[in-house]
Image (cartoon, rainbow, N blue to C red):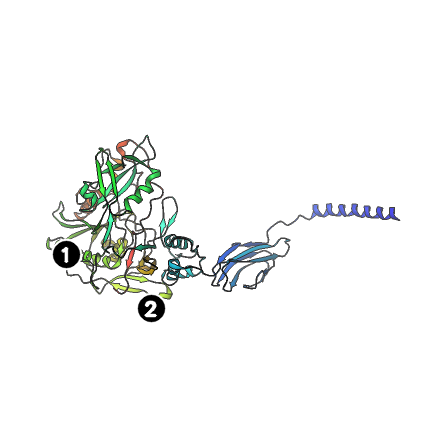
Amino acid sequence: MKRLLQTIFAAAAVALLTVCAVSCKDTPVDKTKKLSLSKTSVTINAKGQTTEFTIVAKAAWTLTLSGSWITASPTSGTAESTVTVKLTATPNDGEAMRVSTVTISAAGESEPYIFTVNQSGVNTLTGINKWVYETLEKWYYWNDAVKAATLPSNSLAYDEFLNTLLLDLDGAQDDTENPPTIDGNYYANGDRYVYSYILQTSATRAASEETTFGFDIEPFYISKDDANRLGFLVKWVQPDGPADLAGIKRGMWIYQYAGANIYLSQYETFWYQLHYQQGGNTMTLTDDADNEYDLTAASMKVTPILYHDVITSDEGKKVAYLVYNQFERGEVVGRGDGEYDNDLRELFGEFKAAGATELVLDLRYNPGGYVSSCQILTSLSGAVGASDVFAKLLRNDDIREVYNVANPEVANFLDEPNSLGLDKIYVLETSYSASASEMVINALRGVLGDNAIVHIGTKTEGKNVGMDLLEQTVGAYDYEMWPITFKIMNAKDFCNYAGGLTPNYLKNEYWDIINTEGGVLREFGDPEERLLNAALTLIDGGQVVDDTSSRAAQTRAATGATEMKQPAKILNNPRQGGAKYIPNL
């Protein structure tokens, strides 16, 4: 019997193998995936929120969840369907992150699909970081994205905490625009930076003063034999500042710092030493003729009026010319206007008295500043008045509801007695022009028309958002934070310039230096300076031809070098690029 059973089992085994062989050959296994998920994981905040993902199904499916703190809807679907699954989590009262595994089983597949939900622990922020987060929850333009964010570690320094939080936000952009409006922009190497910033302030520093060497630079590669060696062209010099008193002029070349050549790897350090310093710090620079300049940083009032003149064109026209470097108000007494705002008014009175009938606003290096100062400058320039819309400010829903703010807030131009009242204005702007500088063009075009404002230079930064000043004292320190809190529209509701304003006439001020042996950067006010010359030519009815490239390879032609790529990451000065708004002005 035992041998018979063995024979029967052996025969059955052979039969089974035969059937399997035939079956496997005649019926191919379906290896096609039955489901496709739009994503496989998500991280949500501790407050509890609803998130979602999409399932594209070729077969019927069901899902289950681990953890009683999360629910899903729907929990099943049919074949040949596309379904959005909504996951709703309750608040997490604990400090630790918790995880739920969503298991999705498809008919005809043995292995399930896994979706993971990570929920952060309760907010344990303290001190200044707690204030930063809670303030952004209320005031930030994309505050819903802040509410949904996973919080950075409280161990981060206040400025690093702010940057980390904002750079990681999901949904903090306006996708209806192309390119979308965001908080910040991108470095040449693709890394993103944000405009919003926070500073620890000194109660003893005068609001209208800053510690500075009083000049700025543009980097170039200068050697065909040493590919990483840099030289720096002086762009502007603050009158009566340390650099001016030391003899440094616009258009000079800086070849050495502290007696040594400067290389690409040292660029960021050099930039910081130039722009962030304490009073009494020193710097020794050497030009291309081996002349040395000793500078000592000093605290001073930095007037935004860098240069001004009334130029007579070749056709005898009186042209008011103003180089305005930042929209700063200066010292404010009570609720009056700032001293720099009043300086503008006085200057335009001089323009008017001199018989100026044309205006060139040189904002090529102006990164922005106070909206109120922009309002004054534009009102002094164009044929506009108090009945014309200067700007519309869009805010988040919470601010509009809590503070009963109109949607949008509307600000009009001002009636300025010294206004030139011009129907056409020439504006020089470049990639360094941002925010309130761009607002000059956009605001005036909103009333006078697109052709009334002639933009000469290169494409601008593309900052169509602005900031409010928010202040707080935590412990022994005072802080001021400037987060993005509104978007800026003109009278025609136009605000879609996050990609920058494109010039009417493309002109690169470094063109002669790049392309001409012995080319120089001319002084402000020189009628032969490239950008100003283009404006004067147009004023006299002449023709202006675009440069073939907005920013050619920046290599000093006289060295014989053939190509230069600008240093990939030029650091962003957090005091620049801000359209600042003081509530209830």
**Residue 14's quadrant in the figure?**
top right
Which callout, 1 or 2, points at the residue further toward the start of the chain?
Answer: 1
What kind of element bears circle 2? loop
Q: Looking at the rendered structure, which numbered label has been put on residue 489?
A: none
Q: Is the C terminus in the top left, top right, bottom left or bottom right quadrant?
A: bottom left
In the figure, 231 relative to 357: above or below?
above
What kind of element bears circle 1? helix
Tell me where residue 58 appears, x and y as whole percent.
Answer: 59, 55
Q: How many marks?
A: 2
| Depth check, front residue: 164 or 515 | 164
Q: Is residue 84 left or right of residue 297?
A: right
Q: Identify residue for label 2.
A: 403
Q: Identify residue for label 1.
A: 346
- Looking at the picture, which amino acid does disc 1 mark? Glu
| Depth check, front residue: 432 or 483 | 483
Circle 2 crowding by C-alpha within 10 Å: few under 14, some 14–19, many from 20: few
For the point 44% across and 58% down, which residue is it? 149
- Looking at the picture, which amino acid does disc 2 mark? Tyr
Q: Is residue 352 left or right of residue 438?
A: left
Residue 455 appears in the rendering: no
In the figure, 326 relative to 562: above or below?
below
Tell me where residue 363 appears, x and y as whole percent.
Answer: 24, 50
CA–CA distance in space, label 1 to label 2: 36 Å
